[in-house]
Image (cartoon, rainbow, N blue to C red):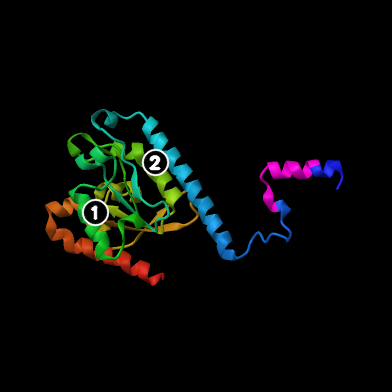
């Protein structure tokens, strides 16, 4: 080996590129599973970066709702969720902790998920509006439209197979309809994104906070949950 080759070899070693120095050829793709895992890691990192951008955009967005709220509330769960649950807006507990559905309504939602054998950490949970409205009032149409682009961006990032709408505000935002929730629930709808080349099957149902005030509607909500469970089981 001449002096020039020795210098090149030393440079490679110092650079930490040790795999060039093996006695036998390296098998880069030892099995397809390793390649799939790598692709999943890359995709997960991409989603994390994208959701961080959305959160930063919401933080920088000037809105009057900021004045009466304590914390920004965006999402809880996983970015790889098959199901996205969308509520109305943060309440007092959510505003305090910065996490959606952690109060009494959130506890009921957890029970609803458990009833159809879904863990909270397996889904993506968010709201139409990301700051708590004063005195927990219902978001106005203007506020719904104000935050709708951020909600649509979240859907595009997660790419769920199913969307479960919790309450009339979420139904109005995603289904773009003035129809009452009672006329929308009990059937499948389709959400279409301009960015995603697919339809997302969507159910509109009652908000857990409403069910706490009006428990007589829990049976109807349970029927909607069973529709979701059946569809998910059928695809297995």
Q: In x, y percent, where is residue 117?
A: 29, 65
Residue at image coords 68%, 53%: 19
Where is residue 15, by image quadrant? top right
User: What stretch of residues is rendered in magenta?
Assistant: 7-19
Q: Say the numbered circle drawn on residue 150.
A: 2
Q: Give the prevailing secondary structure in the magenta stretch.
A: helix
Q: Residue at x 24, y 56 (%)?
A: 110
The residue at the point 28 percent across, 35 percent down is: 71
> Residue 124, image x and y in percent?
35, 52
Q: Secondary structure at mark 1?
A: helix
Residue 226 horizontal side relative to residue 104, left or right: right
Local packing at callout 2 (Cα closer than 10 Å; few below 14, some 14-19, many 20+) is many
Q: State which quadrant residue 162 falls in.
A: bottom left
Label 2: which secondary element: helix
Near-viewer residue (131 or 186): 131
Q: Is residue 63 above or below residue 210?
A: above
How crowded pointer 1 is (Cα within 10 Å; few <14, some 14-19, many 20+) is rated as some
Number of the front mark, 2 or 1: 2
Instruction: Tell me if I can see residue 94 in this picture.
Output: yes
* Residue at 77 percent of width and 45 percent of height: 9
Which residue in the protein does label 1 denote?
181
Q: Is residue 169 left or right of residue 163?
A: left
Residue 195 visible:
no
Residue 16 lies within the magenta run = yes
Can you give x and y, in whole percent of width and height, for residue 156 in the image? Answer: 45, 49
Residue 115 located within the stretch drawn in magenta: no
Q: Earlier in the sequence, mark 2 or mark 1?
A: 2
Whole-Å distance between the Cαs marked 2 and 1?
A: 23 Å
Q: Quick check: 193 above or below 95?
A: below
| Residue 164 horizontal/vertical position (percent) | 31, 56
């Amino acid at each position: 080996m001449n002096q020039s080759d020795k210098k090149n070899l030393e440079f490679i070693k110092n650079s930490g590129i040790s795999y060039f120095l093996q006695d036998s050829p390296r098998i880069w793709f030892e099995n397809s599973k390793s390649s799939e895992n790598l692709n999943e890691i890359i995709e997960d990192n991409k989603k994390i970066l994208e959701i961080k951008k959305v959160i930063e955009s919401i933080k920088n967005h000037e809105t009057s709702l900021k004045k009466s709220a304590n914390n920004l509330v965006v999402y809880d769960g996983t970015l790889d969720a098959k199901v996205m649950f969308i509520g109305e807006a943060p309440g007092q507990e959510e505003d305090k902790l910065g996490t959606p559905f952690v109060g009494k309504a959130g506890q009921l939602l957890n029970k609803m998920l458990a009833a159809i054998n879904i863990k909270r950490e397996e889904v993506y949970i968010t709201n139409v509006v990301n700051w708590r409205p004063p005195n927990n009032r219902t978001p106005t149409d203007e506020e719904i439209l104000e935050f709708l682009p951020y909600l649509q961006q979240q859907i595009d990032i997660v790419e769920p197979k199913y969307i479960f709408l919790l309450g009339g505000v979420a139904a109005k935002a995603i289904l773009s309809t003035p129809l009452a929730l009672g006329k929308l629930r009990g059937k499948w709808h389709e959400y279409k994104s301009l960015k995603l080349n697919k339809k997302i099957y969507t159910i509109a149902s009652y908000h857990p906070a409403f069910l706490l005030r009006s428990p007589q509607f829990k049976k109807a909500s349970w029927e909607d949950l069973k529709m979701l469970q059946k569809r998910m089981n059928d695809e297995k």
